[in-house]
Amino acid sequence: MKNTGIKISLFLNYFVFAILLNSVGIVIAKSINVYGVSESQASVLEAFKDLPIAVVSFFIASFLPRFGYKKAMLTGLAIVFASCLLMIFGNTFLYTKVLFMAIGVSFALIKLSVYSLIGIITDSKKEHSSLMSSIEGFFMVGIAAAYFLFPAFYSDTDENAWLNVYYVLMLLIALSFLFLLFSKVEYEVEVIGSNIKEDLIQSLKLILVPLVLVFLASAFFFVMIEQGIMTWLPRFNEKIFSFSEALSVQMAVIFALSLAIGRFLAGYLTKKISWVFLVIVCVLISGGILLAVLPQLEVDVEALTEISSLADVPILGFILPLIGLFIAPIYPLLNSTVLSSLPKNLHSPMSGLIIIFSALGGTIGSRIVGELFENIGGANAFYFLLIPMVLLIVFVLLIDKISKKQAQVNS
C-alpha cells in the first residue's frame, strides 16, 4: 500500500501527543492539589499550551514545506522528550508551564505536518475526510490512554509518584522518533511562492477569503467547547461529584472514548448524511445534554462523601461525558471540508490558520471556565458552553450559505 509507513507514523505521533497535550486537565488538578495553586492560577497552563501552538503555527506554516514535514515532526519529538525530563527533575508549578510551552511548540510542528501530509497522500475528498476522521479518532484514543496512564502512578503516600509517568511517556516518544526516523516518506510538495516572504504573504491572504474566515470562526467556537469540557472535567468530577482524585481522572476517560467513537463514526456517517445537517444535530444534542444534566447538580457538596469506587458513581457521572459522542464529528468535518476544497500547496498555511484559531479558542474557553469554576462553581461554569454552541450553529449555517453561492457561481 502506498505511503503505508508515513500513515503509520502520523497515527503514532498523534497518539503520543494526544497523551501529552490533553494531560493538561490532569496536571491542572495535580497542580492544585500538590503545588497549592488556585483554579484560576492553574488555568494558565492552557494558555502556556495553546499560545505557543498559535505563535509557532503563524510563523512556520508557510515555511514548513521548505523545511520538510519529517524533519519538523522529528524536531517536535526531540523538544518534548527534553521537556518531560525537565518536568521530572524540576517538580514545581513553574516546570509545568515549561512543559506545556514545549508541548505547544512541538504539537504545532506535528499537527501542521500531519494535516498537510493528509492532503498530499490522499487522492479524493472522501479519502481525505476518512483519513482525517480516523487520525482524529485515534487522537482521542490517546487521550483515553492518558486518563488510565496517569492515575496508575498516583500514590497515597508519595505525592510526587505521579511524575514517574513521564518516564513512560519518554519511552513512547523515543519509539515514535525511531519509527519516524526509519520510515520512508514518499511525497513531493509544491511551495506557494518563490521565497519565504512570498510564502507568508500568500498564506496570510487566505484569511481574506470569506469561506475560510467563517470556517476559522467555527473552529474557534468548537475548540472552546471541547477544551472547556476536556480540561475541567477531572476537576469537575472531583468537586461536583466528590470523586477521589484517581477516579475523577479515570471517569474522564468516558469523554475521551466518546470523542474517539464519534470521530470514527463520522467518517461513515458523512457518506450517508449531509455534513451540515450532522454538525447541527450534534450541537443541539450536546446542548440538550448540558441542559438536562447541569440543573440536577445543584447539591450540597460538603454533605457528599468521597466516592472512590466505580460501582458507587451516580448515573449523572456517566451521562455528562457522553456529550463527547456528539461533539466529536464536528472538528474533523470542518477541517476536512475546508482543506479538501483548497489546492494542496495551500494545505500547510491553511492548517496553520486552523491551528491558530483552534488554540485561541481552547485557551479562551478553558480560561473562562476556570474563572467561572472558581467564582460561581463548576456546575454553573459549564452553562457558559451553551454560548459557543449557539454561535457554532450560526457559523455552520453561514458556511453552507457561502458554499452554495460559490457553487452557483462556478456552475
Image: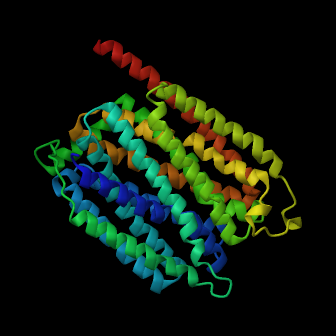
User: Can I make out residue 20 in this image?
Assistant: yes
Residue 301: % across, % down: 84, 63
Which residue is painted at 78% across and 67% down in the image? Answer: 307
Q: Quadrant of residue 332?
A: top left
Which residue is painted at 54% across and 52% down in the image? Answer: 364
Which residue is painted at 31% across and 42% down in the image? Answer: 350
Residue 110: % across, % down: 33, 58
Which residue is painted at 36% across and 74% down in the image? Answer: 81
Q: Decide if residue 207 is on the left or right side of residue 27.
A: left
Choose between 139 and 48: the one closer to the eye: 139
User: Can I make out residue 56 in this image?
Assistant: no
Residue 43: % across, % down: 58, 64
Q: Does 16 appear above or below 349?
A: below
Furthest toward the front, the residue is 1
Residue 130: % across, % down: 38, 38
Q: Quadrant of residue 310?
A: bottom right
Q: Decide if residue 90 is on the left or right side of residue 190.
A: right
Q: How many marks?
A: 0
Q: Quadrant of the C terminus?
A: top left
Q: Does 235 appear above or below 397?
A: below
Colour mapping = rainbow
Q: Decide if residue 192 is on the left or right side of residue 261.
A: left
Q: Does 287 appear above or below 300?
A: above
Choose between 197 and 31: the one closer to the eye: 31
